[in-house]
Amino acid sequence: MSGAKVAVIGGSGFYQMDGLAGVEERRIETPFGAPSEIMIGTLEGQRVAFLTRHGVGHRVLPSEVPYRANIWALKSLGVQRIVAINAVGSMREEMAPGHFVVPDQLIDSTQGRAGTFFGRGLVAHIAFDQPFCPELSGMLVGAAQSAGATVHRGGTYVAVDGPAFSTKAETGLYRSWGISIIGMTALPEARLAREAEICYATLAYVTDYDTWHEDHEPVTADVIIGMILKSVTAARDAVRDVVRRLPVERGCPCGETLAKALITPLHLVPEETRRDLAPIIGKYMPAGAESWHGR
């Protein structure tokens, strides 16, 4: 069974990928527990992995998503690029419900989420000044426009834990920071993807104005679901267009992130850590180091 070089992570309302042919489910054991459901099939002539972030039936809270297991599993399948779909609230008038945003910056306001593969005897400090792959983000903008959506390029996404929506005071604070959109799942997902040397970009669909807009009622789950249902077709069309246009070779530095990030000499790294992180650091490990075969 072959792997995939492209992955789509579906968020709220994006539970299946129309047009994915020859679908097979992959059950992958990782050192970080079981990942979310992963299906592999062919889309626009490319092998694509589709991962449902919240599980079938939306059973998993944003803070419960097995982010490390998900990214580890996708890396083990050979994935080089991830297109992430996220439902978000807007902090700016021009980013209206029903529009799409391809952000270029992130602020982490989550607490307690396991946000790195490193530790346990291995120190690494990745460059994360551009948290989203510029090359893949640019392709997403063009694909969303081709799908007929109104899309905004750039902006800052603040990631919060949830599951409750923001208080008015919190929304006021985020707007004072110059935040563009707010969501609950881009982190640590984007950071882990960078550690795994995978290109990562987000296509976010705006479902609401959070709690700040005087002409709109405060956000509720039923409002979000209603707007998602209106946006999901355009999101799927955009994903298909991106997959169809992807060049074979990457023209960005995402695939060499760890070349200047690993601090600990790898011969000093504990054997268990080397095994567990083999898909992530394998190409940098000394010859003969063991790979991870599961337990």
Image (spheres, rainbow, N blue to C red):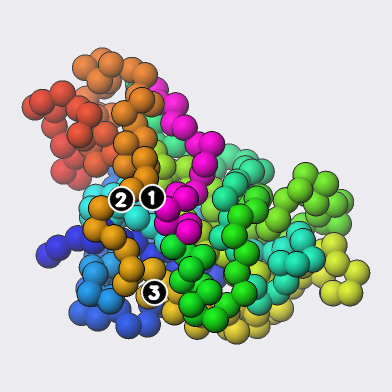
Main SS of residues in magenta: loop
Pick the front one: 142 or 47:
142
**Residue drawn at x 57%, y 77% as measured from the top left:** 149
Q: Earlier in the sequence, mark 3 or mark 1?
A: 1
Q: Which residue is mark 3?
A: 241
Mark 3: give few (<14), some (14-19) or many (20+) Cα within 10 Å: some
Q: Nearer the viewer, residue 222 or 93?
A: 93
Residue 35 position, x and y percent, is 36, 56
In depth, the one of 14 and 103 nearer the eye is 103
Q: Quadrant of the C terminus?
A: top left
Measure how far apart labels 3 and 1 are at the Cα level. 17 Å
> Which mark is first along the chain, 2 or 3?
3
Which structural element holds mark 1? strand
Q: Is residue 235 above or below residue 88?
A: below
Measured in 3D between alpha carbons, the distance from the residue under mark 3 to the one under mark 2, in whole angstroms, is 17 Å
Residue 250 is tagged as: 2
Residue found 32% across the figure and 63% down from its top: 246
Circles 1 and 2: CB atoms closer than 8 Å = yes
Q: Residue furthest left?
A: 288
Q: Would residue 194 be found to the left or right of residue 6 on screen?
A: right
Residue 86 image position (x, y, % from top left): 55, 64
Which residue shows up at 37% across the image and 75% down it?
Answer: 240
| Residue segment shown in magenta | 123-138
Query: Are the two marked residues, 3 and 2, in contact with CB atoms closer than 8 angstroms?
Result: no
> Vertical placement of 232 versus 114: above or below?
below
Q: Measuring from the top left, give residue 21's x and y in whole percent.
A: 25, 81
The dot on residue 199 is: 1
Q: CA distance from mark 1 to mark 2?
A: 9 Å
Q: In what element is the residue under mark 3?
A: helix
Whether tag 3 and tag 1 are in contact, CB under 8 A, the answer is: no
- Quarter where residue 38 is shown: bottom left
Q: Measured from the top left, where is residue 46 in percent x and y?
A: 24, 70
